[in-house]
Amino acid sequence: MRKVFGLMVLSMVFLVACNNTDSDGVPRVEDPNNPVDAKGNPISTGDFIKKYCRGMVKINNETCDNVSQANHAKSLKGGLPKGW
């Protein structure tokens, strides 16, 4: 009985570890500056936020937060305007 229970636990851990999305259905992203969609295709940070993070303002999703911060940092890059 213990062996069967142990195999069930190991199979559940394996299935959870192989899943590419978190509990909210947002794909896990290793590099927030270069996110990928659920199929592994590259996607821009703005498109990622529109597609996966819409309506998650009250839900603290780590992936959405990281990609949002990367998107905000990209928007701040650039030189100062003339006259500064």
Image (tube, helix red, strand yellow):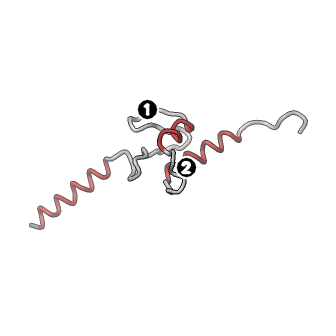
For mark 2, give the secondary structure: helix
In the picture shown, does residue 75 fall above or below 16?
A: above
**Residue that badge 2 annotates:** 66
The residue at the point 51 percent across, 45 percent down is 54
Mark 1 → mark 2, Cα distance in angstroms: 18 Å
Query: How many numbered marks are there?
Result: 2
The residue at the point 24 percent across, 55 percent down is 12
For mark 1, give the secondary structure: loop
Q: Position of residue 26 (x, y in %)?
A: 43, 46
Disc with the residue nearer the chain's start (1 vs 2): 1
The residue at the point 58 percent across, 46 percent down is 68
Q: Mark 1 near mark 2, Cβ–Cβ under 8 Å?
A: no
Which amino acid, mark 1? Asn
**Residue that badge 1 annotates:** 41
On the image, which quarter does residue 5 sit in?
bottom left
In the picture shown, does residue 48 fall above or below 56?
A: above
Which amino acid, mark 2? Asn
